[in-house]
Image (tube, rainbow, N blue to C red):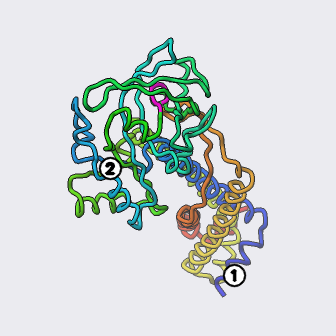
Amino acid sequence: MLIKTAIHSIIRNPRRMFSILLTIAVGSSTLYIVYGFNSGLITEYRERTIHSQHAHGTIFTKGYYDTVTDTPWKNWITNWKSLSEELEGLPFISQTFPRTSFYAILSNGIKNIDAKGEGIVPSKEINFFTSLNFIKGGPLTTEGDGIVLGAGLAKALSVEVGDNISILTNTIHNTSNAIDLTIHGIFKTGNDLFDKMSFRLSLNHSQILLDTDKIESLSIALNEKYNWQALTTHLKKTNQDLEAISFEELEKVIYSNSIEWLSSQFIIIMIIIYMLVILAIINSISTSIIERYQELGNLRANGESKFDLFKTLMLESSILGLAGSAIGIIIALTISNFFLKSGILMPPPPSLSLPIRVFIPFSFKMILISVFFGIITSLLATLVASIQAIKIPIVNLLRSE
């Protein structure tokens, strides 16, 4: 009976009902979209970092990453083929990418430029590292005589796809070695430092240049359920000579610091939005209760107790909060799935030079938060306004217009 009475009181004044529902709906939908935008931005930033350079992280020999030495190859991984097979058999790892990095001089016959090369297995990397963003040509697809360059490096050398280029470096035995390769593609990740000094060639060619069968590191791609801690735990149990370093640590300046900056900014924005939404809902509900003073006076005069009126108003508020939040979620999902289906093109984030397209993901967690926020804010506004209303004498309530 109390619920029927509350619903009747709500729908009896359509203008007042729609005003409150609209306020709560706009607040809930705004919170969902803003949260979704920030979540989508961070996710896209993360995925771009993972699928351009380090995957989810990299395995080195213990202490290698933090150590500077003039003979780094002495601490490279020797049994990498069996290690790779072992790791790919674990349930939380999908792929491993053996790599060897080295510094070399690149020459087009006229210009000579120092650069950093990476030896990779093209057949393994082509389907995972999709964020290199090739502006000319394409990725390495075979173990042939190809090489790919960063856009800044290619510009400095004045070379294009199809040109031949010479790579000169020292082997691990401190003798000079060189190889001629054909430029297969030019990429632009948006990380200017990386694009100005990086090139990639097949692992086979890098090992020939360095005269070694070792690899420097083994990059790791995890399965969809991200579990980097499981890998570090596994290595501690099975191979204490190795250590796993996540991409967040490898890209602390470019990625981790930027994410912290974005997250801090988002917290401030959300606090401002929460305050504005709370004030709007409180104002709307308080005004509606003030408009009902005469009605509340009549109910009091007919024998309704203060507690009964309080219960009715709070129940009405709960229904309005739930309904308004549900409408807001529907509005937010409609906007994100239809009007923003192709994402939002944003300027380059910190430390990058390429724009980023942000998609608003579905978030069941944020749906619950938005609904909870709408109901609680509605109840809070009603609590304050109803306590003031029931304290007013019946005569004064009846005189209200």
Determine which quarter of the picture holds residue 335. Answer: bottom right
Q: Tell me where residue 390 appears, x and y as whole percent.
A: 57, 70
Give the residue pinned by disc 1. Answer: 5
* Label 1 secondary element: helix
Specify the principal SS of the magenta part: helix
Q: Tell me where residue 284 appears, x and y as whole percent.
A: 65, 57
Q: Tell me where residue 384 appears, x and y as whole percent.
A: 53, 63
Residue farthest toward the top in the current orientation of the protein: 110
Residue drawn 52% across the image and 33% down it:
147
Residue drawn 42% across the image and 54% down it:
96
Asked if the stretch drawn in magenta spans residue 353, the answer is no
Task: Judge the density around disc 2: few (<14), some (14-19), many (≥20) Cα neighbours within 10 Å.
Answer: many
Residue drawn 53% across the image and 64% down it:
365
Amino acid type, callout 1: Thr
Q: Which of the image's four quarters has the C terminus?
A: bottom right
Asked if the stretch drawn in magenta spans residue 197, the answer is yes
Task: Answer yes or no: is residue 343 visible.
Answer: yes
Is residue 335 rendered to the left or right of residue 369?
A: right
Determine which quarter of the picture holds residue 210. Answer: top left
Mark 2 or mark 1: which is in front? 2
Residue drawn 49% across the image and 29% down it:
195
Work out how far the residue at label 2 is from the one at label 1, CA to CA, in angstroms: 66 Å
* Marks 2 and 1, the one that precedes in the sequence: 1
From the viewer's perspective, is residue 304 above or below residue 14? below
* Label 2 secondary element: strand
Determine which quarter of the picture holds residue 135. Answer: top right
Span highlighted in magenta in the image: 195-199
Amino acid type, callout 2: Ile
Q: Tell me where residue 314 appears, x and y as whole percent.
A: 58, 73
Task: Judge the density around disc 1: few (<14), some (14-19), many (≥20) Cα neighbours within 10 Å.
Answer: few
Q: Which of the image's four quarters has the N terminus?
A: bottom right
Give the residue pinned by disc 2. Answer: 59
